[in-house]
Image (cartoon, coloured by chain):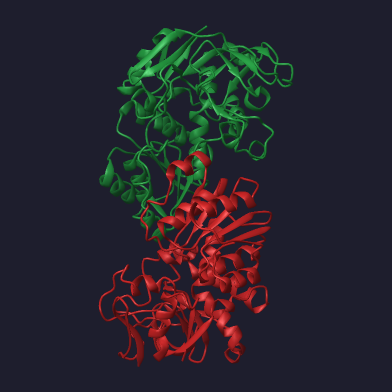
Chain colours: A green, B red
Amino acid sequence: MRATVIHGPNDIRIEEVPDAAVQKPTDAVVRTVLACICGSDLWAYRGVAQRQPGQRIGHEFLGVVEAVGAEVRGFKPGDLVVAPFVWSDGVCEFCVEGLQTSCPHGGFWGTPGSDGGQGEAVRVPFADGTLVQLPQEAAGDQRLLTALLALSDVMATGHHAALGAGVGPGRTVAVVGDGAVGLCGVLAARRLGADRIISMGRHPDRTAIARTFGATDIVAERGEAAVEAVRELTGGVGAHAVLEAVGTEESMRTAISIARDGGSVGYVGVPHGGSAGVDIGQMFDRNVALRGGVAPARAYIPELLADILNGTIDPSPVFDAVVGLDGVPGGYKAMDERTALKVKITF
Amino acid sequence: MRATVIHGPNDIRIEEVPDAAVQKPTDAVVRTVLACICGSDLWAYRGVAQRQPGQRIGHEFLGVVEAVGAEVRGFKPGDLVVAPFVWSDGVCEFCVEGLQTSCPHGGFWGTPGSDGGQGEAVRVPFADGTLVQLPQEAAGDQRLLTALLALSDVMATGHHAALGAGVGPGRTVAVVGDGAVGLCGVLAARRLGADRIISMGRHPDRTAIARTFGATDIVAERGEAAVEAVRELTGGVGAHAVLEAVGTEESMRTAISIARDGGSVGYVGVPHGGSAGVDIGQMFDRNVALRGGVAPARAYIPELLADILNGTIDPSPVFDAVVGLDGVPGGYKAMDERTALKVKITF
């Protein structure tokens, strides 16, 4: 089969790799229907996050079950499914309580020895614990399928940020980051009943999506000017709930600075700035909490899926470009250069 | 009147200062009955936290109202009262929601222009917003008065740490720090229904108090060995709720490391290690939250007071030494050298 492989910084290739196959009785093989490129893949693309040369890449996909191992109970060939961005056994104490990202048997697509999501098929470990069934009718609806693809990561991650930030009715929310996760954070905040949602970004295409998703205010400034702008919008006190969806030192510093005293920063941007942006002295004096991390997408998919199906949310606008498998290297380039927000891959 | 004054590192003096007096119609003057020395006072004593030479010091006291301004409604001369470690107006949005430490009109005892708690009397701004009435009968009960003195800071701060850490029934709790706040954190965790409480400390007198307060396990190790010990006690996974009551880089690093995935660190140790101990990468991967800060003692005093009066908790054992006002400099020395846990001052 063919799959996306990373050989080094700026070196993404499409190559022949061994066919995905059932290796353990709890495995399934999923034939990919849609996949996509994540902002976090760019850390590897840019060489900031290390990868072994020749490692697979991609962690967001949905598709059709092609084969299942002897112990798989919940799925059969032909089922339409979505995978969260980590696999998990579904039965350990962490899985049971909804923190599947801490499953001791879990793993991340594309790590050595596993298939990546940006390939024609994927061997899925612990299929019963990992996959979520989608309605068969969705198969013929490209707009709906695209929205469902967001469940694999960005919609679930935006929701995790909103939960970490304590979003709820009556809350004023600020979202740092206008990438796909930040935009999904806006959508998640609206879904959770936020009164007012301040989206921070300057790219007109992205702020337009933020408005569609529920942003009531846009702040285009950065750094200290952004902090001032949010303060001004919030009567001088800041936002109850801040979603941090970037992961740099500056974005974390901004997020903490614009939180209202007693508020929370829900952070989901993969940290690439160390803890230098975490101003613990300011957090202490103002009782600002920091809560987030890698999103247990598997825990959130059922409720978010229901709300996509009933029309409450539609994250599909975050995908603003589409490529076939051969176009994936160009998709990375487009996202790296910010000419594309999020690239969908069709098979 | 006479009060404690700090002139520089290791230079605590008892001096004649202007009498405390009503200056504004919302003020009260409280004649001090009991006060004490706080672990956080030692940061100033050691020169780590800067003070102006001649500044007052001390922020924990209870006493008898001596005079009230014309607008004070809730108190009259003769009332027995306790003060939290900051004053607050009681009517702003932060006070109303229980975050009195963020009151825009609030302040900290001993800041320039205000009286400190370690003196014969204290001018209390916003008396109605700040003070809490104590039962008159307590005046004659030294053990009870001593327990009530802990409400001004350490018991409320331990409770804040426990809330920040998410302590509740069925939770395994670990407490980093065996000072008075850490010990009160043990007591607060037991009060909130924790199943198991691991107290981290090596000083036999302190671990004995920890046992009395509800600690089920003691870990004497430090650093990496402490992390291993807590992991071993918790089936390899760490504690759901970790109370950080020290404020150094090492203590924060330990606290985050011993938290179970998905758990919280409730931190109340005044940060003196910058953010270097905040391992954001580890927090992200394991979804460990950081929540705490300066405790809004005023918000907690009513419920904690009720539980001291009904015998549910008795924090008085954290006071293991007592001095008169002239003995205060020696009290600082004793606490700095760790020959005293917490020094009570009688007037």
Q: Quadrant of residue B58?
A: bottom left
Of residues B343 and A188, the one nearer the viewer is: B343
Q: Is residue A84 above or below residue A116?
A: below
Q: Is residue A215 above or below residue B223?
A: above
Whether residue A47 is visible: yes
Q: Nearer the viewer, residue A34 or B341?
A: B341
Q: Position of residue A166 (x, y in %)?
A: 51, 47
- Asked if residue A127 lies left or right of residue A163, the reply is right
Viewer-nearest residue: B336 or A331: B336
Name the residue at 31% across, 42% down: A250
Q: Residue at x 46, y 36 (%)?
A: A185
Is B232 on the left or on the right of A155, as rendered? Answer: right
Q: Is residue B244 left or right of residue B230?
A: left
Report x, y in % for residue A186: 45, 36
Closer to the camera in the image, A1 or B224: B224
- Above/below status of B66 relative to A289: below
Residue B192: give x, y in percent of width and height. 64, 62
Number of marks drawn: 0
x, y (%) of residue A333? 33, 18
Q: Residue at x 49, y 63 (%)?
A: B245
Above or below, B191 relative to A30: below
Instruction: Tell me if I can see residue B240 in this picture.
Output: no
Q: Does residue A171 appear left or right of residue B106 in this picture?
A: right
